[in-house]
Amino acid sequence: MNDNSVNNHITPHTSEYTLDIIDKTTNEIILIYNNKNVDDLIEIMNGFPLNRYSRKLTGDDMYLWEA
């Protein structure tokens, strides 16, 4: 097995981006946003500080997980 294949992630085809906000104390998704404009979701995402929330942004061309 190639070591680089471990980090590969294939996202499903969609016309929208999805932002999940996860509460770190309960490890539960508390909010889900869908939008065709990734910039709108990044603006929302930045309103949730990483010291309390994890943030996952996915779409056709991206998979971003911040914990």
Image: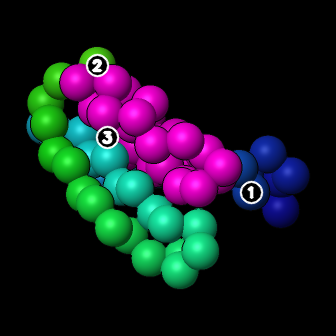
User: Looking at the image, do the residues carrying marks 3 and 2 touch, with CB atoms under 8 Å apart?
Assistant: no
**Percent of width and height locating residue 4:** 79, 45
Q: Is residue 56 magenta?
A: yes
Res. 39 mark: 2
In this view, the residue farthest toward the top is: 39
Q: Which mark is residue 59?
A: 3
Asked whether 54 falls inside the magenta stretch, the response is yes
Image position of 15 (left or right of 51): left
Q: Type of residue at label 1?
A: Val
Name the residue: 53% across, 55% down: 53
Mark 3 and mark 2: Cα distance apart in space: 12 Å
Classed neighbour count for the residue bearing mark 1: other residues with Cα under 10 Å, few (<14), some (14–19), many (≥20): few
The amino acid type found where label 2 is placed reads: Asp
Task: State the residue at coordinates (40%, 34%).
Answer: 47
Crowd band around label 3 with a 10 angstrom C-alpha radius: few (<14), some (14–19), many (20+): many
The answer to whether residue 3 of the structure is visible from this angle is yes
- Of residue 35 and residue 31, the one placed in the foreground of this image is 31
- Would you place residue 33 above or below residue 30 in this image? above
- Along the polypeptide, which appears first: circle 3 or circle 2? 2
Which mark is first along the chain, 2 or 1? 1
Q: Amino acid at mark 3?
A: Gly
Q: Secondary structure at mark 1?
A: helix
- Which is more foreground, mark 3 or mark 2? 2
Colouring method of the image: rainbow
Magenta-drawn segment: 40-67
Q: Quadrant of residue 27?
A: bottom right
Q: How many discs mark residues in the rendered view?
A: 3
Q: Which mark is residue 6?
A: 1
